Amino acid sequence: MERGFGLCKPNGFNSLVTMQSWMFLSSYEALRDKLLIERTIQTMAHLGARAFSEISGEVVQTTAFVIHAAHIEFFKPVFFRLLDGGSNEKESALLSGVGRFDQTIQADFKQMPGCPIAYWATPAMKRIFQSGSSVGLVGSTKQGLATGDNGQFLRYWHEVSLSNFCSSATSRDDARQSGKKWFPCNKGGAYRKWFGNNDYVVNWANDGEDIKFDKLERLEKGQILASNSKPKNMDYYFKEGITWSAIATGDLSMRYSSSSFMFETKGAMYFGKDHESLMYVMALSNSKISGLFLRILSPTLDFHEGPFLKLPLIVENPAKISETVDECISIAKRDWDAYETSWQFLKFGLASNIEGSVSISQSFDNWSLQIVDRLQRLHHLEVGILVAEGRSPDSSPK
């Protein structure tokens, strides 16, 4: 792009098809800032994935644009949002003028953190970015343990002896004094909100002695180690927080992590200043509102720590929301523990409903009703969180 401008006449035009990454990623923020000040976006067709029949999948996402080499003050570029369908559908949509956005002044992009080219952002969303604080001001994110060899140091919890597994340690000292080898470890996982995906355990015997020794042994042998193959942020192990999956194909899903967990690099964690602020951030993260803002801050498949910390946060009633989130966590935990995939599983729900002369079919109906009631209550609480937050920016395009 910069080479193209170097070849332009002072009032020339730079027209390219490129990857869309420069529009959003933090590594291109300086490029965007310079472009918004010195150049003028005339028109852009945001093509996304599957723009070319020769390239399938979601990884290659493109945009086509015409940018004027000179800057025009108060100019409103024309954007076409053509993310759905294949190349033929995108072409038809472009020719018919579908998904056209032409009401944003180019300078308005600088109102949002990182200056993303988020042409679909509504005026209400921009005001929230300008007027609110951010998630990063009331807490911090940390990357966790990089074992260097997950095959050696990570297991599913059901692969290890329960006699050598500790799920109650609340500090590194507790873990060391327990004499146990395996401890719960957050490692991302599938989409699930509030609680769950507690599948993995890590070898942290004697404060990670085996992992630390393995690293030293490799160094002595001259083996090349990745720069992050080490225990990181150890002071945050076994602390209360919330965790999520860094790579996701859909919306962000936050889960509560008690003070008995460690965390791995794919299960990054956020730690609040106190329980109320932590629960408020969790409520925001699991709401539709966060999805709207994250599509601006990180419209890729990667929900890493940077965009998450930029989420706008306006705390109006954290205490009330904290109580609601605690109940959401409790319901989600009951659901997780109702199946044998949980180490706290005790009895199958269907069996719990078989009493006396009640038939199996009636027991199944009773069990199904309990599940439906649980889900309806959770949905009711989630709607209540949105109302309590009092933040309902205009809906963004699909």
Image (cartoon, rainbow, N blue to C red):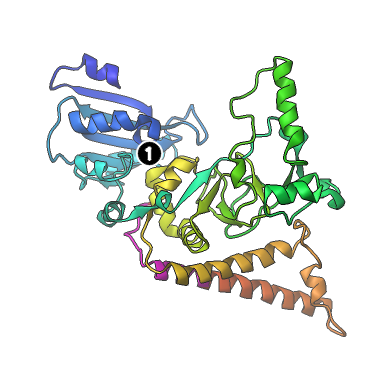
In the drawing, does residue 48 fall left or right of residue 11? right
Magenta-span inclusion, residue 391: yes
Q: Which residue is mark 1?
A: 90
Q: Amino acid at mark 1?
A: Lys
In percent of width and height, residue 46 lies at 34, 37
| Quarter of the N terminus within the rendering | top left
In the drawing, does residue 236 fall left or right of residue 164? left
- Residue at image position (78%, 59%) is 340
In percent of width and height, residue 179 lies at 82, 47
In percent of width and height, residue 303 lies at 49, 43
| Magenta segment boundaries in residue numbering | 381-397
Count of marks, rendered view? 1
- Residue 52 seen by the camera: yes
- Residue at image position (67%, 51%) is 171
Magenta-span inclusion, residue 113: no
- Residue at image position (61%, 46%) is 188
Look at the picture and state if 173 lies above or below 345.
above
* Residue occupying the far bottom of the picture: 357
